[in-house]
Image (cartoon, rainbow, N blue to C red):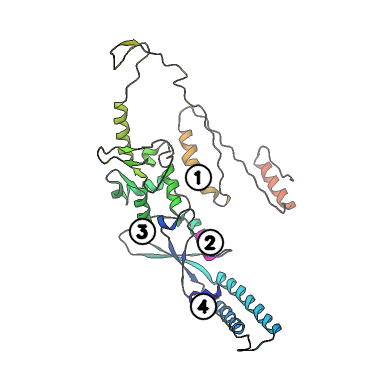
Amino acid sequence: MPRAATSGALSAAATLLDQKGTGARDQRNMVVFMAADQRRLEDLRHAVAEFLAWQSINDDAGADGLNLDPQQARQAATRRDEADRATDLRMTETYQWVLVPSQPDPNGPVAWDHYRADGEGAPAERASRRLINEGVLYADFAPSLLRRRLDGVLAPLWGAGAVDLTRLWDVLCRYLYLPRLRDQEVLRACVTAGPASLTWQQDGFAVADSVDSETGRYRGLVTGAMAPVVTPATLVVRPDVAEAQRQADAETQPQPAAVGQPVVDPTSGDTGEAVAVTEATAKRPTRFYGVATLDAERLNRDFAKLSQEIVVPLTGLLGTAVTVVVEIVATRQEGFEEHTVRTISENANALRLGAHGFEEK
């Protein structure tokens, strides 16, 4: 770290946030700036100066330089390594501020927001963690949030009926007034879930593999279910366009005959008795279950999303009984202290939890 610090440690450092799961060929990087805390800058200068001094002594330790004996050379190397570690620590302590460009109004000037990113970890890790907690950087993005933008400032993108994921990602990376997604995998997960909501026509969108240039029909159109495969060429389709294609397809499909009515063979013209629709062919699922693992550090956000996307649509159906069971599992390698066991147990009893308790492996 000090070797790089000599040229860039005392100025604002451009930090590329961690891009997980995507290759450099299909993603852009979000650039923010790490700025030094003025009160700690002098300590960093001293640490860098001490490192450079010991580094210089090590470089000149030989017979052609300072002619140090082996013990002195080892001592110089030890002091250099200590100064190296001290500089790393000072760098972490000094660069605590994240400067983020923003543009609340698409037609307005660029503004700068600042956040304190202290704690453990490298600058990029701390910056990412703080920006995600502040809602500036999205590690997950709900389809309803994307739909809101597509109906608003991004409406021209799918004015013709659809927009491909590559174009959508390019726009999200380009303009400061749009949400910042951690990487393209976040957008892919959003598009995958877009058609799956019960209210996809109002809060989501349809997904298709491609469009036929001659007929204008969308191939592999998905509505009311998770998209099986999402690639950079996947199309996000406007719900009204998708619904129009669905209705057109339904009109061209042969309609099932009513029970007891004659069925006409389209090839021979012969008629026959229609087969009665049995209860088995019309049977529908009667029970839903799901298990979700929530982030304990962002419990309110995750539970609210789970409630909005799953629980609320189910409770809104007449005659649906919904039960939500919360399971809490906590493990600690060094074990829980006595006061923690007592406090948690008392709280669990007061809240009338069902089966609960601490146990040993």
In terms of sequence position, does the residue under pointer 4 or pointer 1 come before the other?
A: 4
Question: Marks 2/4: CA distance?
Answer: 22 Å
* Mark in the foreground, 4 or 1: 4
Tell me, for residue 174, which label it has, or none. Answer: 3
Circle 2/circle 4 CB separation < 8 Å: no
- The alpha-carbon separation of the residues under discs 3 and 2 comes to 23 Å
Nearer mark to the viewer, of 2 and 1 = 2
Distance from Cα at disc 2 to Cα at disc 1: 26 Å
**Front residue (pair 346, 33):** 33
Q: Earlier in the sequence, mark 3 or mark 2?
A: 2
Q: Is 357 positioned to the left or the right of 109 in the image?
A: right
Query: In this picture, is 24 found above or below 232?
Result: below
The disc at residue 147 is: none
Q: Secondary structure at mark 4?
A: helix
Residue where numbered disc 1 is placed: 304
Q: How many marks on residues?
A: 4
Q: What is the spatial separation of the Cα atoms under label 4 and label 3, in whole angstroms?
A: 32 Å
Residue under label 2, please give it.
Answer: 125
| Circle 1 SS class | helix
The residues tagged by marks 3 and 1 sit, at their Cα atoms, a distance apart of 30 Å
- Determine the residue positioned at 40% across, 46% down: 231
Residues drawn in magenta: 118-128
Q: Residue at x 51, y 48 (%)?
A: 301
Q: Position of residue 40 (x, y in %)?
A: 55, 75
Q: CA distance from mark 4 to mark 1?
A: 47 Å
Q: Nearer the viewer, mark 3 or mark 1?
A: 3
